[in-house]
Image (cartoon, helix red, strand yellow):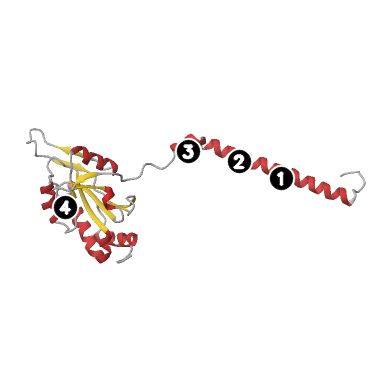
Amino acid sequence: MSKRKPAKAGTKTRRINAVALVLSVIALVIVAFLAGRQYFATGGPEQQAADSPAPAIGGPFTLVDQNGKTVTDADFRGRYMLIYFGYTFCPDVCPTALTRNSDALDLMGKAADKIVPIFITVDPERDTAENMKEYAGFFHPRLLALTGTPEQVAAAAKAYRVYYAKVQEKGADADDYLMDHTSITYLMGPDGKFLSHFGHDVSPERMAERLTKIVGGAGG
Ligand code: NI
């Protein structure tokens, strides 16, 4: 306890102000300390840059459609792209996925008009434009089937992070092989950016439901 005489009113107010000032300074020091600790915990600007999200799926491509016309990703701005990578000689996986995608679009009715279904081959050696034209016709009247030079196809697959590799038995003919490949369908937005993806096991009904939710109903 203080043995001093009671302070005068003015002194008391000054003392309260002084206490408030000291508390403010302490609070500032704590805030600065915490901010500094946070800064160094994340390693400063360099570390933060390294932690930024991985590059998005999708990107520029230049390919050739089933009518021999060169197309690029920029041709589809303003519309949604539903993209699947595969190859026409695929015995099972590709036909299943392309059928599912077509069924989903059919289930959507008019809303599907906003979506361009696209099939990109990972087997440009055998998938000529003529080949692709016949194949696309089996699945959907609007299916755009794209091929290109091996380099063009490689660039497109890389942009979409699609894995593919030739699987050939020893002693087989040069054109007798299978392609191992990723089986994922990508939905890209009107700005060309990645929106969603559909695994191989998603049903046509579920896919139609999810697509409609994203692109909205008919019109719009
Ligand atoms: Ni396939």
Q: Which amino acid does label 1 sit on?
A: Ser
Residue at the spot 18% in from the left edge and 38% down from the top edge: 150
Q: Residues within 10 Å of mark 3 (few under 14, many from 20)?
A: few
Indicate the quadrant containing the N terminus: top left, top right, bottom left or bottom right. Answer: top right
Tell me which corner region of the image, top left, top right, bottom left or bottom right, holds residue 167.
top left
Say whether mark 4 is within 8 Å of ligand 1: yes
Label 2 vs label 4: CA separation?
Answer: 57 Å
Q: Which mark is residue 99?
A: none
The type of residue carrying mark 3 is Gln
Q: For label 1, count other residues whose C-alpha is less than 10 Å away and answer few (under 14), some (14-19) or many (20+).
A: few
Q: What element carries label 3?
A: helix
Q: Distance between the residues labelled 4 and 1?
A: 70 Å
Q: Which mark is residue 24?
A: 1
Per the image, label 1 sits on a secondary structure element best described as helix
Q: How far apart are marks 1 and 3 (CA)?
A: 31 Å
Task: Work out which residue is located at the far right of the displayed protein and give it.
Answer: 5
Mark 2 nearby-residue class (10 Å; few <14, some 14–19, many ≥20): few
Q: Which residue is under mark 3?
A: 48
First in sequence, mark 2 or 3: give its number. Answer: 2
Q: Name the residue under label 4.
A: 95
Q: How far apart are marks 2 and 3 (CA)?
A: 17 Å
Question: Which of label 4 and label 3 is nearer to you?
Answer: 3
Q: Mark 2 points at which residue?
A: 34
Structural crowding at the residue carrying mark 4, measured as other residues with C-alpha within 10 Å and reported as few (<14), some (14–19) or many (≥20): some
